[in-house]
Image (cartoon, grey):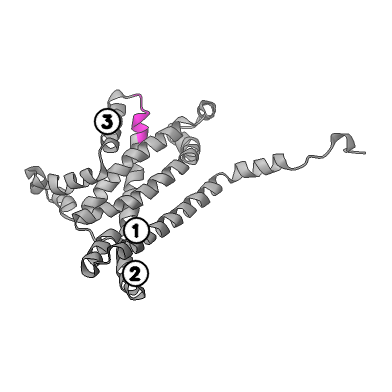
Amino acid sequence: MIDLIQLAVPVLLKGLWVTAVLTFISVLIGFNLGLGLALMRLSSNRFLSGFAKYYSNVFRGTPLLVQIFLFYYGLGQLSLIKDNAVLWWLISDGARCAVLALALNTAAYTSEILRGGLMSVPVGLVEAAQACGMSRMLRFRRIEFPLAIRQALPAYGNELILVVKGTSLASTITVLEITGYAKRLMSQTFAIFEIFAIAGVLYLVINLLLIGIIRAIERFLMRHETSSVRYLAAPQPNRSTVGS
Protein backbone atom coordinates (compact mmCIF):
# COMPACT_ATOMS: atom_id res chain seq x y z
CA MET A 1 0.00 0.00 0.00
CA ILE A 2 2.82 2.41 0.90
CA ASP A 3 4.54 1.68 -2.39
CA LEU A 4 1.30 2.39 -4.24
CA ILE A 5 0.89 5.71 -2.44
CA GLN A 6 4.47 6.67 -3.26
CA LEU A 7 3.77 5.84 -6.89
CA ALA A 8 0.37 7.51 -7.16
CA VAL A 9 0.76 10.75 -5.22
CA PRO A 10 3.50 12.38 -7.39
CA VAL A 11 1.56 11.51 -10.55
CA LEU A 12 -1.74 12.79 -9.21
CA LEU A 13 -0.07 16.00 -8.05
CA LYS A 14 0.68 16.72 -11.71
CA GLY A 15 -3.04 16.55 -12.33
CA LEU A 16 -3.67 18.76 -9.29
CA TRP A 17 -1.96 21.66 -11.06
CA VAL A 18 -4.08 21.16 -14.17
CA THR A 19 -7.24 21.00 -12.04
CA ALA A 20 -6.29 24.26 -10.31
CA VAL A 21 -5.64 26.01 -13.64
CA LEU A 22 -8.91 24.76 -15.13
CA THR A 23 -10.82 25.95 -12.07
CA PHE A 24 -9.14 29.37 -11.89
CA ILE A 25 -9.60 30.27 -15.56
CA SER A 26 -13.17 28.92 -15.67
CA VAL A 27 -14.19 30.84 -12.55
CA LEU A 28 -12.48 34.03 -13.76
CA ILE A 29 -14.35 33.95 -17.06
CA GLY A 30 -17.58 32.59 -15.60
CA PHE A 31 -17.85 35.20 -12.84
CA ASN A 32 -17.46 38.17 -15.17
CA LEU A 33 -19.83 36.65 -17.72
CA GLY A 34 -22.29 35.75 -14.97
CA LEU A 35 -22.22 39.30 -13.61
CA GLY A 36 -23.00 40.64 -17.07
CA LEU A 37 -25.85 38.16 -17.46
CA ALA A 38 -27.24 39.10 -14.05
CA LEU A 39 -27.31 42.78 -15.03
CA MET A 40 -28.94 41.85 -18.34
CA ARG A 41 -31.56 39.81 -16.48
CA LEU A 42 -32.44 42.83 -14.34
CA SER A 43 -32.48 45.17 -17.33
CA SER A 44 -35.69 46.78 -18.48
CA ASN A 45 -34.77 45.82 -22.04
CA ARG A 46 -36.87 42.76 -22.87
CA PHE A 47 -34.37 41.44 -25.41
CA LEU A 48 -31.46 41.54 -22.97
CA SER A 49 -33.43 40.10 -20.06
CA GLY A 50 -34.91 37.40 -22.29
CA PHE A 51 -31.52 36.38 -23.67
CA ALA A 52 -30.06 36.11 -20.16
CA LYS A 53 -33.07 34.11 -18.97
CA TYR A 54 -32.93 31.56 -21.79
CA TYR A 55 -29.14 31.28 -21.54
CA SER A 56 -29.46 30.44 -17.86
CA ASN A 57 -32.24 27.92 -18.48
CA VAL A 58 -30.31 26.12 -21.23
CA PHE A 59 -27.03 25.74 -19.36
CA ARG A 60 -28.61 24.97 -15.99
CA GLY A 61 -31.10 22.58 -17.51
CA THR A 62 -28.60 20.34 -19.33
CA PRO A 63 -25.81 18.19 -17.85
CA LEU A 64 -22.28 19.56 -17.89
CA LEU A 65 -20.98 16.33 -19.42
CA VAL A 66 -23.35 16.72 -22.38
CA GLN A 67 -22.20 20.31 -22.85
CA ILE A 68 -18.54 19.22 -22.86
CA PHE A 69 -19.25 16.55 -25.46
CA LEU A 70 -21.21 18.98 -27.63
CA PHE A 71 -18.38 21.51 -27.57
CA TYR A 72 -15.55 19.03 -28.10
CA TYR A 73 -17.10 16.49 -30.46
CA GLY A 74 -20.07 18.36 -31.91
CA LEU A 75 -18.74 21.80 -32.82
CA GLY A 76 -15.71 20.27 -34.50
CA GLN A 77 -18.00 18.78 -37.15
CA LEU A 78 -19.25 22.18 -38.32
CA SER A 79 -17.52 23.68 -41.34
CA LEU A 80 -18.03 27.15 -39.87
CA ILE A 81 -15.80 26.18 -36.95
CA LYS A 82 -13.22 24.39 -39.08
CA ASP A 83 -12.84 27.34 -41.44
CA ASN A 84 -12.39 29.86 -38.61
CA ALA A 85 -8.84 29.72 -37.21
CA VAL A 86 -9.76 31.26 -33.84
CA LEU A 87 -12.79 29.05 -33.19
CA TRP A 88 -10.93 25.93 -34.31
CA TRP A 89 -8.01 26.79 -32.02
CA LEU A 90 -10.47 27.18 -29.15
CA ILE A 91 -12.20 23.80 -29.44
CA SER A 92 -9.44 21.69 -30.99
CA ASP A 93 -7.68 21.28 -27.64
CA GLY A 94 -9.32 19.35 -24.82
CA ALA A 95 -8.16 21.69 -22.05
CA ARG A 96 -9.36 24.83 -23.83
CA CYS A 97 -12.66 23.17 -24.67
CA ALA A 98 -13.09 22.09 -21.04
CA VAL A 99 -12.46 25.66 -19.86
CA LEU A 100 -15.03 26.94 -22.36
CA ALA A 101 -17.70 24.50 -21.22
CA LEU A 102 -16.99 25.01 -17.52
CA ALA A 103 -16.95 28.80 -17.86
CA LEU A 104 -20.22 28.98 -19.78
CA ASN A 105 -21.84 26.54 -17.37
CA THR A 106 -20.77 28.29 -14.19
CA ALA A 107 -21.73 31.66 -15.72
CA ALA A 108 -25.35 30.51 -15.85
CA TYR A 109 -25.40 29.56 -12.17
CA THR A 110 -23.38 32.62 -11.18
CA SER A 111 -25.85 34.91 -12.95
CA GLU A 112 -28.72 33.54 -10.86
CA ILE A 113 -26.71 33.80 -7.64
CA LEU A 114 -25.68 37.40 -8.33
CA ARG A 115 -29.16 38.33 -9.52
CA GLY A 116 -30.54 37.22 -6.18
CA GLY A 117 -27.87 39.26 -4.39
CA LEU A 118 -28.61 42.37 -6.43
CA MET A 119 -32.34 42.01 -5.84
CA SER A 120 -31.71 41.87 -2.08
CA VAL A 121 -30.16 45.35 -2.01
CA PRO A 122 -32.59 47.67 -0.16
CA VAL A 123 -34.35 50.05 -2.51
CA GLY A 124 -33.94 52.87 0.00
CA LEU A 125 -30.16 52.75 -0.28
CA VAL A 126 -30.32 52.95 -4.06
CA GLU A 127 -32.74 55.89 -3.91
CA ALA A 128 -30.51 57.64 -1.36
CA ALA A 129 -27.52 57.22 -3.67
CA GLN A 130 -29.54 58.64 -6.56
CA ALA A 131 -30.54 61.59 -4.39
CA CYS A 132 -26.86 62.24 -3.64
CA GLY A 133 -26.20 62.52 -7.36
CA MET A 134 -24.24 59.30 -7.82
CA SER A 135 -23.95 58.03 -11.34
CA ARG A 136 -25.27 54.58 -12.15
CA MET A 137 -21.77 53.08 -12.41
CA LEU A 138 -20.58 54.69 -9.19
CA ARG A 139 -23.72 53.59 -7.38
CA PHE A 140 -23.22 50.02 -8.58
CA ARG A 141 -19.54 49.97 -7.62
CA ARG A 142 -19.91 51.50 -4.16
CA ILE A 143 -23.30 50.30 -2.97
CA GLU A 144 -25.11 47.67 -5.02
CA PHE A 145 -22.28 45.28 -5.84
CA PRO A 146 -20.64 45.22 -2.36
CA LEU A 147 -23.99 44.53 -0.69
CA ALA A 148 -24.98 41.97 -3.31
CA ILE A 149 -21.72 40.02 -3.04
CA ARG A 150 -22.15 39.75 0.73
CA GLN A 151 -25.52 38.11 0.27
CA ALA A 152 -24.39 35.93 -2.63
CA LEU A 153 -21.06 34.74 -1.23
CA PRO A 154 -22.30 31.61 0.62
CA ALA A 155 -24.18 30.35 -2.44
CA TYR A 156 -21.30 31.29 -4.72
CA GLY A 157 -18.93 29.33 -2.50
CA ASN A 158 -21.00 26.23 -3.20
CA GLU A 159 -20.78 26.97 -6.92
CA LEU A 160 -16.98 27.16 -6.72
CA ILE A 161 -16.91 23.71 -5.13
CA LEU A 162 -19.10 22.38 -7.93
CA VAL A 163 -16.70 23.83 -10.50
CA VAL A 164 -13.77 22.04 -8.85
CA LYS A 165 -15.66 18.76 -8.97
CA GLY A 166 -16.82 19.51 -12.50
CA THR A 167 -13.22 19.62 -13.71
CA SER A 168 -13.12 15.85 -13.28
CA LEU A 169 -15.32 15.58 -16.37
CA ALA A 170 -12.50 17.06 -18.44
CA SER A 171 -10.86 13.63 -18.31
CA THR A 172 -13.53 12.42 -20.73
CA ILE A 173 -12.01 14.58 -23.48
CA THR A 174 -8.39 13.51 -22.94
CA VAL A 175 -7.43 16.19 -20.38
CA LEU A 176 -4.98 14.81 -17.81
CA GLU A 177 -6.12 16.41 -14.58
CA ILE A 178 -6.52 14.49 -11.30
CA THR A 179 -9.15 12.09 -12.60
CA GLY A 180 -7.34 11.71 -15.92
CA TYR A 181 -4.11 10.66 -14.22
CA ALA A 182 -6.09 8.43 -11.86
CA LYS A 183 -7.57 6.59 -14.84
CA ARG A 184 -4.10 6.14 -16.32
CA LEU A 185 -2.73 4.77 -13.04
CA MET A 186 -5.72 2.48 -12.68
CA SER A 187 -5.02 0.91 -16.07
CA GLN A 188 -1.38 0.40 -15.08
CA THR A 189 -1.80 -0.90 -11.53
CA PHE A 190 -5.40 -2.23 -11.53
CA ALA A 191 -5.70 -0.82 -8.01
CA ILE A 192 -9.05 0.84 -8.66
CA PHE A 193 -10.15 1.51 -5.10
CA GLU A 194 -6.80 2.75 -3.81
CA ILE A 195 -6.06 5.07 -6.72
CA PHE A 196 -9.46 6.75 -6.75
CA ALA A 197 -9.46 6.98 -2.95
CA ILE A 198 -6.25 9.00 -3.14
CA ALA A 199 -7.73 11.13 -5.92
CA GLY A 200 -10.82 11.71 -3.78
CA VAL A 201 -8.64 12.87 -0.89
CA LEU A 202 -6.96 15.42 -3.18
CA TYR A 203 -10.34 16.80 -4.27
CA LEU A 204 -11.41 16.94 -0.62
CA VAL A 205 -8.29 18.89 0.36
CA ILE A 206 -8.86 21.39 -2.46
CA ASN A 207 -12.48 21.94 -1.46
CA LEU A 208 -11.68 22.25 2.25
CA LEU A 209 -9.10 24.92 1.45
CA LEU A 210 -11.65 26.65 -0.77
CA ILE A 211 -14.27 26.55 1.98
CA GLY A 212 -11.77 28.06 4.41
CA ILE A 213 -10.97 30.90 1.99
CA ILE A 214 -14.65 31.62 1.35
CA ARG A 215 -15.41 31.71 5.09
CA ALA A 216 -12.46 34.03 5.71
CA ILE A 217 -13.70 36.39 2.99
CA GLU A 218 -17.21 36.21 4.41
CA ARG A 219 -15.98 37.11 7.90
CA PHE A 220 -13.99 40.01 6.43
CA LEU A 221 -17.01 41.37 4.55
CA MET A 222 -19.27 40.99 7.58
CA ARG A 223 -16.79 42.39 10.12
CA HIS A 224 -18.79 45.59 10.62
CA GLU A 225 -21.98 43.71 11.51
CA THR A 226 -20.02 41.51 13.93
CA SER A 227 -18.61 44.59 15.63
CA SER A 228 -22.11 46.07 15.92
CA VAL A 229 -23.48 42.89 17.47
CA ARG A 230 -20.65 42.82 20.02
CA TYR A 231 -21.27 46.46 20.88
CA LEU A 232 -24.99 45.90 21.41
CA ALA A 233 -24.32 42.77 23.46
CA ALA A 234 -21.88 44.57 25.75
CA PRO A 235 -23.31 45.75 29.12
CA GLN A 236 -24.39 49.38 28.94
CA PRO A 237 -23.82 51.85 31.80
CA ASN A 238 -26.77 52.55 34.10
CA ARG A 239 -28.11 55.99 33.30
CA SER A 240 -29.22 56.52 36.85
CA THR A 241 -25.63 56.26 38.06
CA VAL A 242 -24.07 58.42 35.37
CA GLY A 243 -22.71 61.63 36.87
CA SER A 244 -23.36 60.56 40.44
- Is 182 displayed left or right of 141 in the figure? left
Of the image marks 1 and 3, the number of the one nearer the N terminus: 1
**Residue 199: % across, % down:** 33, 61
The residue located at (19%, 58%) in the rendering is 174
The residue that disc 2 covers is 9
- Is 94 displayed left or right of 5 in the figure? left
Q: Nearer the viewer, mark 2 or mark 1?
A: 2
Neighbor class of circle 2 (other Cα within 10 Å; few <14, some 14-19, many 20+) is some
Question: What's the amino acid at mark 2?
Answer: Val
Neighbor class of circle 3 (other Cα within 10 Å; few <14, some 14-19, many 20+) is few
Of the pair 133 and 52, the residue shown nearer to us? 52
Residue furthest right in the image: 244
Of the pair 194 and 183, the residue shown nearer to us? 194
**Residue 224: % across, % down:** 61, 43
Question: What's the amino acid at mark 1?
Answer: Ala
Write down the region rendered in magenta.
38-44
The residue located at (70%, 39%) in the rendering is 232
The residue located at (17%, 49%) in the rendering is 72
Residue 63, above or below 168: above
The residue that disc 1 covers is 20
Of the image marks 2 and 1, the number of the one nearer the N terminus: 2
Q: Is 110 within the magenta? A: no
